[in-house]
Image: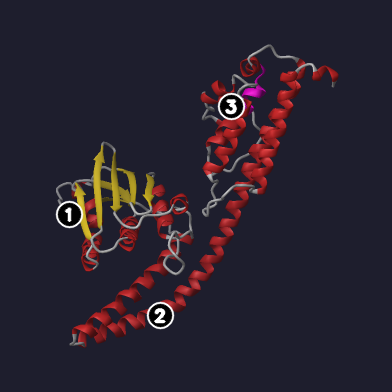
Amino acid sequence: MNRLDRIPETIYLFKAAHRLLLAAERVRRLDCLAWSGDGSMPQSSIDRLWTEWASEQLPHLPGLQTILSQGRSNDASLSTSTISEPKDLCRSVALIHLRTFIDAINFPHLHESLLGRQVTEEDRIGLSMLSEAAQTMVQSIVDRVRFEQATERATQQAIYDFAYGLTHEINNPLANIAARAQQLLAQATSAADQKSLATIVDQSMRAHEMLAEMMRAVKPKHWNPTIVLLADCLQSLLTRFRSAFQARQIEFEVEGDFEGIAISTESSEFRDAIGSLLQNALDACSPSDSVVLSAQAWGDSVDLSVKDTGCGMSQQAVENAFSLYFSGREHGRGLGISLANVRRVVDAMRGEISLTSGEGIGTQVRIRVPVASMPPSKRGKRIRIES
């Protein structure tokens, strides 16, 4: 130990390994981490924890930044790490950097680049401990994700069982209520009675849709896409929502060119996803607010956007917007399912989705999905979506 005392740079390798082990313990114990509701790692928390550790090491590991910036090979067979990761594990920046860091340590010819000096035997002992600490950090992340995913699967199965029974038991009386209300509506003569009965029918259907939405979230059907025209897919949906926005005195506009754009999707699922975005915008707006649905083609993809000038979302709601069961509204006004379903549909289409919002400034959700070759039978078809 006296020899090590004379080499402060080597001592710092042991300190760095100790700090990394403490970070791994924080991941394992969820200390200061906010885990997302969909079972995936909270990117910002893990990445922030890793970034703090890496920043502390730069004065003592001058080659660290260069090695990390090179990234890790996409070929997993080239990695020297012994951790087996689940295929669907979320790849955070921290995890990619950790794997790159482990590879750098386990290749001796990179040691001098990492340390910025000649490597001693004591350095190699310290680097070996640092490699083990990094492996422990990776294992903590992997174990945590596996636990969260297992918990999420069990939760989804429990909710599915509950929702299945609930749907069966509630849909029957809902159907009777809607049917009787429609009968009475056909016979009603006063405007007040017609309005009340129409509300009963609408709310009954809305309750049915919420139950169906819950079922789709916990037990999505097999994805079997077909090529459809975007305008054809959305036409009936927009007709329905124009009436809803008009009834609430909310301005609704459709911008861009929807004609001639084909996408590969489950048309009903995609229509429900866009419907969820429009419904969220409707719920967030007051009279005199506005909602804009826009589309713009970019080569091999198309961007869809739903933008409103409504109440907006808090920072916490924005961070958890796509988490299953999280609702940014007050209790009793949302199931926390719609945006998770939207993301599921976009992911199935190999697309991207983002959300920007702020309290008092409205919300915008952007979706980018690939375009598809238009079926020959529909190439001459033109469906105009009115703005």
The amino acid type of the residue labelled 2 equals Asn
| Residue at image mark 2 | 172
User: Sequence-wise, which precedes: disc 3 or disc 1?
Assistant: 3
The answer for how far apart the CA atoms under marks 2 and 1 are is 36 Å
| Residue at image mark 3 | 78
Q: Is residue 3 left or right of residue 216?
A: right
Q: Residues within 10 Å of mark 1 (few under 14, many from 20)?
A: some
Give the foreground label among 2 and 1.
1
In this rendering, the answer to whether 115 lies above or below 256 is: above
Residue 56 % position (x, y): 62, 28
The residue furthest top is 118
Q: Residues within 10 Å of mark 2 (few under 14, many from 20)?
A: few
Residue 300 % position (x, y): 29, 38
Give the foreground label among 3 and 1.
1
The answer for how far apart the CA atoms under marks 3 and 2 are is 58 Å
| Residue at image mark 1 | 385
**Residue at figure coordinates x 21%, y 62% from the top left:** 242
State which region is magenta.
Answer: 100-108
In this rendering, the answer to whether 349 lies above or below 199 is: above
**Residue at figure coordinates x 56%, y 38% from the top left:** 48
The residue furthest front is 360
Q: Nearer the viewer, residue 363 or 323?
A: 363
Q: Is residue 87 visible?
A: no
Name the element at disc 2. helix
In this rendering, the answer to whether 4 lies above or below 50 is: above
Which quadrant of the rendered structure holds the N terminus? top right
Q: Nearer the viewer, residue 254 or 309?
A: 309
Q: Which quarter of the picture shows residue 11?
A: top right
